[in-house]
Image (cartoon, rainbow, N blue to C red):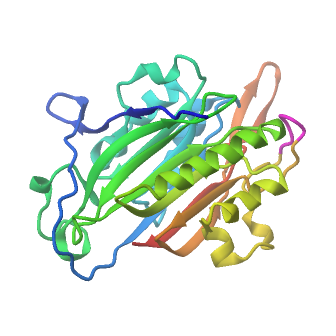
């Protein structure tokens, strides 16, 4: 029997007075009569590639593309974030001004693994306590989503992977809880049995007592055709398939001009957004740009920001 260890973690906001990231208090759901409500949120998920050259410069370009585009997201899921890259992202003035971030001070995340996941939540849409809600604060009805528990679930894994999740409480329904889960499932073809276990565990996390549903998004490493069946097997809704169908050739997210690591060819839809209890409205693949990599006595080589594309998904709660 697999025992999954739950590790509580923190969300932090940047304190401009102390010039440091500080943990924020989180809200417990309180039973109360609900009213009719609908909220639209947007998510971008991106495996930013820990292994290629110039990781910090590439991460900065990806972040700039995410934040300076016409549709800045409410939620950002990043995978393959190294310790140095995390420091760079947390030092970005736009992140400090507008986002809450997970695990800002926890260096133990990198003790046994080369990279981890990171979640950013817009402070315009999410608040750390009821006292922070202000009328007309950028959300319909003048209220923000409350933040509940923030945790990492240790998964059965060859590579030490876990699932980072944040519980959110809608402003008009304080007795309702949804869960946003950032994942990087096990890599390569010989880890299919781990991915099958991981998907089952994550689906069950969304069905825990008191949880009304939510999203699992990130790098699913869906290498094998059997991987695609895991979504249906666990009765999850694949947002891309719902909106674009199974055969849309524009859904591939991996192998942007490269072929490496296990001879996995390009054109794979490794990254996904799946959900329960929510409704996907729009979804697109975000293509990475190019960055130069200097080479001694040679013409600089150009590589993509990441070997993965990003995913943008807008959904309704």
As rendered, which of 266 and 178 lies closer to the eye? 178
Q: Is residue 196 left or right of residue 60?
A: right
User: Does the segment drawn in magenta span residue 24?
Assistant: no
Placement of 62 over or under 279, stated as above or below: above
Residue farthest to the front? Answer: 1
As rendered, which of 156 and 184 lies closer to the eye? 156
Residue farthest to the bottom? Answer: 36
User: Looking at the magenta stretch, what is its main secondary structure?
Assistant: loop
From where the camera sits, is residue 295 visible?
A: yes
**What is the quadrant of residue 311 in the picture?**
bottom right
Q: Quadrant of the N terminus?
A: top right
Q: Is residue 144 left or right of residue 195?
A: left
Instruction: Identify the residue at horizontal 85%, vertical 37% (top origin).
Output: 260
Q: Quadrant of the C terminus?
A: bottom left
Range covered by the magenta-colored residues: 258-263
Instruction: Identify the residue at horizontal 31%, vertical 41% (top origin).
Output: 96
Placement of 16 over or under 36, stated as above or below: above
Q: Is residue 121 left or right of residue 17?
A: right
Q: How many marks?
A: 0
Instruction: Identify the residue at horizontal 11%, vertical 63% (top origin).
Output: 134
As rendered, which of 202 and 302 lies closer to the eye? 202
Q: Position of residue 308 (x, y in %)?
A: 69, 48
Q: Is residue 309 left or right of residue 78?
A: right
Q: Position of residue 222 (x, y in %)?
A: 75, 51
Q: Position of residue 178 (x, y in %)?
A: 38, 60
From where the camera sits, is residue 267 visible?
A: no
**What is the quadrant of residue 268 in the picture?**
bottom right
Placement of 109 over or under 197, stated as above or below: above
Instruction: Identify the residue at horizontal 87%, vertical 42% (top origin).
Output: 259
User: Does the segment drawn in magenta span residue 259?
Assistant: yes
Q: Position of residue 56 (x, y in %)?
A: 55, 31
């Amino acid at each position: 029997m697999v025992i999954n260890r739950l590790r509580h973690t923190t969300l932090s906001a940047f304190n401009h007075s102390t010039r440091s990231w500080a943990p924020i208090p989180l809200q417990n759901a309180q039973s109360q009569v609900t009213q009719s409500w609908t909220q639209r949120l947007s998510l971008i998920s991106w495996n930013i590639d820990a292994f290629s050259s110039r990781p910090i410069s590439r991460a900065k370009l990806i972040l700039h593309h995410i934040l300076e585009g016409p549709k800045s997201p409410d939620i950002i899921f990043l995978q393959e974030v190294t310790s140095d890259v995390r420091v760079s992202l947390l030092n970005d003035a736009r992140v400090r001004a507008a986002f809450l971030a997970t695990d800002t001070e926890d260096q133990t995340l990198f003790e046994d693994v080369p990279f981890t996941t990171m979640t950013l939540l817009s402070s315009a849409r999410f608040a750390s306590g009821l006292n922070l809600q202000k009328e007309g604060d950028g959300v319909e009805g003048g209220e923000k989503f409350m933040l509940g528990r923030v945790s990492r679930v240790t998964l059965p894994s060859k590579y030490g992977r876990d699932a980072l999740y944040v519980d959110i409480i809608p402003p008009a329904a304080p007795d309702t809880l949804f869960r946003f889960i950032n994942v990087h499932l096990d890599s390569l073809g010989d880890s299919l049995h781990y991915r099958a276990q991981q998907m089952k565990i994550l689906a069950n996390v969304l069905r825990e007592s008191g949880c009304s549903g939510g999203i699992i998004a990130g790098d699913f490493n869906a290498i094998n055709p059997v991987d695609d069946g895991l979504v249906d097997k666990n009765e999850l809704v694949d947002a891309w398939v719902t909106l674009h169908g199974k055969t849309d050739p524009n859904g591939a997210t991996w192998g942007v001009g490269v072929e490496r690591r296990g001879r996995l060819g390009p054109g794979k839809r490794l990254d996904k957004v799946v959900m329960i209890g929510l409704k996907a409205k729009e979804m697109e693949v975000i293509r990475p740009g190019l960055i130069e990599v200097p080479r001694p006595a040679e013409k600089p080589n150009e590589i993509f920001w990441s070997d993965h594309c990003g995913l943008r998904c807008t959904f309704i709660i």
